[in-house]
């Protein structure tokens, strides 16, 4: 019985930690949207790599900040087929203090990390808390 308490306690703790990280990512995105600068970026180029025999494309965006300095941002997401065309304009938001902190203004561009963290945390929290609550009664 002690083994199961430790195991489900670990699942609950891990789920809570992942949910905490997910909320932290959500809060950073919310703060970036609130205080960041919105602009348009241009698709500058694509880097490629192979994944399971498929060519994956990672876009690189170019944008100019308020100080008229040009910055480049490589997306954290690769896809097949290409998600954009070279020269296409994309809405972004960047941190006014750190123009390297950039997010594409789209649902997945803004919220992919928190959603994935919450998706992993949810079953861990349900399993862990369910068993621990069951043991109390």
Image (tube, rainbow, N blue to C red):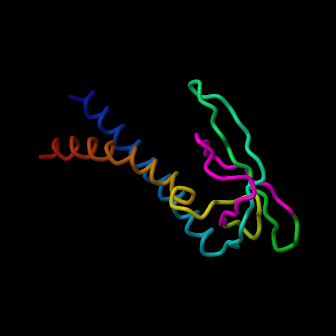
Position above or below: 99 against 78: below
Q: In the image, is 32 to the left or to the right of 121?
A: right
**Extreme residue in the left direction:** 137
Among the 4 quarters of the image, the one containing residue 15: top left
Front residue (pair 137, 85): 85
Residue 126 pos. (x, y %): 27, 46
Residue 26 pos. (x, y %): 51, 61
User: How would you classify the magenta stretch by its main secondary structure?
Assistant: loop
Residue 71 pos. (x, y %): 82, 59
Q: Residue at x 51, y 61 (%)?
A: 107
Position above or below: 62 against 127: below
State how many labels appear. Answer: 0
Q: In the image, is 116 to the left or to the right of 93?
A: left
Among the 4 quarters of the image, the one containing residue 42: bottom right
Q: Residue at x 70, y 73 (%)?
A: 37
Q: Residue at x 21, y 41 (%)?
A: 131
Among the 4 quarters of the image, the one containing residue 80: top right
Position above or below: 22 against 131: below
**Extreme residue in the top direction:** 53
Look at the image and tell me in which quarter the N terminus lies: top left
Residue 88 pos. (x, y %): 70, 59
Q: In the image, is 31 to the left or to the right of 9?
A: right
Q: Is 20 in the magenta?
A: no
Q: In the image, is 6 to the left or to the right of 43?
A: left
Q: Is 80 in the magenta?
A: yes
Q: Which residues are magenta?
A: 70-92
Q: Residue at x 64, y 47 (%)?
A: 76
């Amino acid at each position: 019985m002690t083994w199961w308490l430790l195991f489900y306690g670990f699942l609950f703790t891990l789920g809570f930690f992942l949910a905490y990280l997910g909320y932290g990512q959500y809060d950073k995105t919310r703060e970036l949207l609130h205080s960041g600068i919105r602009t348009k970026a241009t698709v500058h180029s694509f880097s490629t790599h192979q994944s399971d025999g498929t060519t994956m494309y990672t876009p690189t965006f170019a944008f100019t900040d308020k100080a008229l300095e040009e910055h480049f941002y490589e997306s954290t997401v690769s896809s097949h087929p290409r998600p954009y065309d070279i020269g296409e304009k994309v809405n972004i938001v960047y941190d006014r203090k750190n123009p390297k902190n950039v997010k594409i203004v789209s649902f997945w561009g803004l919220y992919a990390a928190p959603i994935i963290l919450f998706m992993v945390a949810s079953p861990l929290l349900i399993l862990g808390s369910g068993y621990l609550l069951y043991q109390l009664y």
